Amino acid sequence: MNATSVPRGNAGRPYIDIRNLSQVFGDRSRGAVTALRDINLGIRQGEFVCLLGPSGCGKSTLLNAIAGFTSPTAGSISVDGRPVSAPGPDRGMVFQEYALFPWMTVEKNITFGLQIQKMPREKIRATVDGLLDKLQLTDFRDRYPKDLSGGMRQRVAIARVLALDSPILLMDEPFGALDALTRRTLQDELLRIWEELRKTIVFVTHSIEESVYLADRVVAMTYRPGTIKREVQVTLARERDPSSTEFNRYTRELAQLVMEEQYRHNQDEIRVLAAE
Amino acid sequence: MRVSRLKPLRVLQGVLVPFAILAVWQWVSASGLVNPQILPSPAAVLTRWLAYLAPLEPYDPAKSGYFTWLLSGELFHDASASLSRVILGFLAGAALALPLGLLMGASDAIYKLFNPLIQVLRPIPPIAFIPLAILWFGLGNPPAIFLITLGAFFPVLMNTIAGVRHVDAIYIRAAQSLGAGRTTLFLRVMLPAAAPYILTGARIGMGTAFIVVIVAEMIAVNNGLGYRILEAREFFWSDKIIAGMITIGLLGLAIDSGMSRLNSFLLKWHRGMEQR
């Protein structure tokens, strides 16, 4: 692989290093919303971290900030010692809405990033063949996204970021729109890929079960302003059994944390509706 | 693509109203209630249309090939003159509107620069430019092409602007995180994402161009379908006027279905296209 496995610069600094991050949207005159306040989070290389919380807790905002789509109001994010200032192929992004380019076939979607990097044609071909095989997409090579199921589309989206060999995968509720069985299949496939390729994954979800099933560490967030409520290390060996007692101990603990925030979310909604 | 089947009932439904109108028309003109110079019978129109269609001279293998001779009738000359003006004017209009529309859609500064002028010019029907066009370009093809260009310009422009402005931000984010720079983003993401709008604009622009060509030919040039029906009026050939109008209708239909085919081909990836 490359030198990224060795922390550079200040030793002991986390691979993804988020310090005192705050994000405020809008301006004071029209009611600013503090989406994130004082987030401090370090993620090790090769770690699988889930950001968990109800809608409005700022978990997607945090992910977008790591991706470089938004610039933080205060604080900093650095990846491997370099500050994040813009989106880039070192942080592959997978969206809930897939975000496949509908005018490109499956193959073209996957090669898009490689062509930008001016990879030689034979190498592109070999990479794409490998990925199509890995994600069981070979038969769909020349299809357009509109002809694929949700699960298939998300496989293509994953193949598209894997093609770039990004060390980091940022996933924004990637399986949220899929049915339960497809979701479990893709979760298992993601874990297999993660273990094989040793990626660092930051995964946003509002499913407690999904976070315990996938993550090394679950970061539970508070509802507005988004702060880190608690971090829970999941020490269960994989493959995890969601029906086991240990698994349920985790889900119970997290459910309590998340439901407190969900309650605040509900109260807020009632207040807004009452004001109208 | 689905093959259209000719179901007898459908065909009957489709021809019922036209045949009823033809029957009434035939009855009115046969009854002697109306002067045939005001309303000729359908049979007279058909005869005139066939004469309009037919070659002017008998076939002479020494002079030209059979196919050339077959298309040497007045109708084909007029139709090809009108069609070539439409195509030329449309291409000029679209070639001007497309880059301007892309720029105006993508850049707020450029939009603000051009938008006020365009909002003032757009409601002026191209036909209102006729006096100025003749003053500037004299008679003949130049003013006609100018007017058609104008007619095609605005629909393509407005739709291109709307198309670029409606590009889903998620495609732009996805492309950026895959490493796309400005040029790639513009050519491989914004342009194809805006294509459905742009092509709708092209279809409307083509329709406008076809309206304008007929008017322009009535005033500025001495061939083409528009000229021919005005010429027929001077001789009180009402049957030829109607024959010319039918030809205009058929040509317009052919152009529009050609554009529609082109759209379906270029947008075969588009969701809305599958039920066609």
Image (cartoon, rainbow, N blue to C red):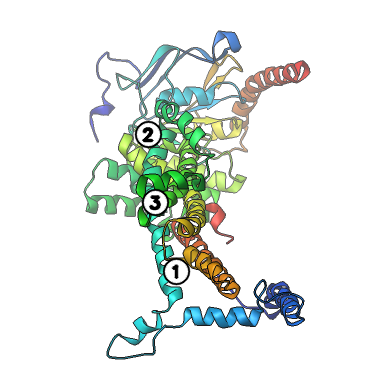
Closer to the N terminus: mark 1 or mark 2?
1
Label 2 sits on a secondary structure element that is: helix
For the residue marked with disc 3, what is the amino acid? Answer: Pro
Q: Of the residues tagged 3 and 2, which is closer to the observer?
A: 3
Report the residue at 46% width, 55% height from top. Answer: A144
Label disc, if present, on residue B176 of the rendered structure: 2
Closer to the N terminus: mark 3 or mark 2?
3
Quarter of the picture containing the C terminus of chain A is top right
Which is nearer the eye, B150 or B47?
B47
Quarter of the picture containing the N terminus of chain A is top left
Badge 3 and badge 2 both on one subunit: yes
Q: Chain of mark 1?
A: B
Q: Alpha carbon of mark 1 to alpha carbon of mark 2: how far?
A: 49 Å
Which is nearer the eye, A132 or A217?
A132
Label 2 Cα neighbours within 10 Å, binned few <14 / some 14-19 / many ≥20: many
Number of marks in the image?
3
Q: Chain of mark 3?
A: B
Image quadrant assignment for residue A15:
top left
When the figure is inspected, residue A33 is found, relative to residue B153, above or below; the finding is above
Q: Which residue is mark 1?
A: B79
Q: Which residue is mark 3?
A: B143
Asked whether the residues under the numbered discs 1 and 3 touch, taking CB atoms below 8 Å apart as contact, a structural biologist would say: no
The location of residue A208, given as percent across then percent down, is 60, 30
Specify whether B40 is left or right of A275: left
When the figure is inspected, residue B268 is found, relative to residue A94, above or below; the finding is below
The location of residue B241, given as percent across then percent down, is 57, 70
The location of residue B170, given as percent across then percent down, is 47, 36
For the residue marked with disc 1, what is the amino acid? Answer: Ala
Report the residue at 55% width, 80% height from top. Answer: B48
The location of residue B245, given as percent across then percent down, is 56, 68
